[in-house]
Image: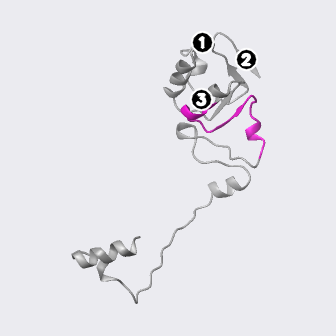
Amino acid sequence: PTLLADVSPDSPVMQEEIFGPILPMMEYTDLDKVIDFIRSRPKPLALYLFTSDHATEKKVLEQVSFGGGCINDTIIHLATSHMPFGGVGDSGMGGYHGKFSFDTFTHYKSIVKKATWLDLPMRYHPYTPGNFKLLKMFLK
């Protein structure tokens, strides 16, 4: 991995999604500003958070959208077939790995088949008070 120090939000490396062993590092003192910064940009493919503070972990996970990630580790979520890996928004759609790959690339076709011998006329306009009462009774 290559660590990049003294990176600013305007640095070229911060202008596109990174695909490689490059980690730009930015210092912060205010977690809310970090969350605002992440949310102001396209949704990241992954988020790696290093903290032992449960409140920080909860806040970041609840307020930031990303494809997948790790707490106190990096990339291990990519190594398991029991978790989907994938992005959200600009970083991708869906997830893959193991059964998740099958689900992502499978088109499930939904079909409703209704018998033709019975069609309840109360389903259609005009709705009389009696038909409306019957509909409410069936929908309970």
Q: Is residue 99 above or below residue 110?
A: above
* The residue stretch that appears in magenta: 58-80
> Could you tell which of marks 2 and 1 lies nearer the N-terminus?
2
Q: Is residue 60 magenta?
A: yes
Coloring basis for residues = one colour
Q: 32 or 108: nearer the eye?
A: 32
**Marks 2 and 3, how far apart at CA:** 23 Å
The residue indicated by pointer 3 is 60
Disc sitting over residue 29 in the figure: 1
> Could you tell which of marks 3 and 1 lies nearer the N-terminus?
1
**Marks 3 and 1, how far apart at CA:** 15 Å
Is label 2 or label 1 in front? Answer: 1
Say what secondary structure mark 3 lies in.
Answer: helix
127 with respect to 109 (left or right): left
What residue type is disc 1 on?
Thr
| Residues marked 3 and 1 touching at CB (< 8 Å) | no
Q: Residues within 10 Å of mark 3 (few under 14, many from 20)?
A: some
Residue at the outermost top position? 6
Q: Position of residue 87 (x, y in %)?
A: 60, 40
Disc sitting over residue 3 in the figure: 2
> Could you tell which of marks 2 and 3 lies nearer the N-terminus?
2
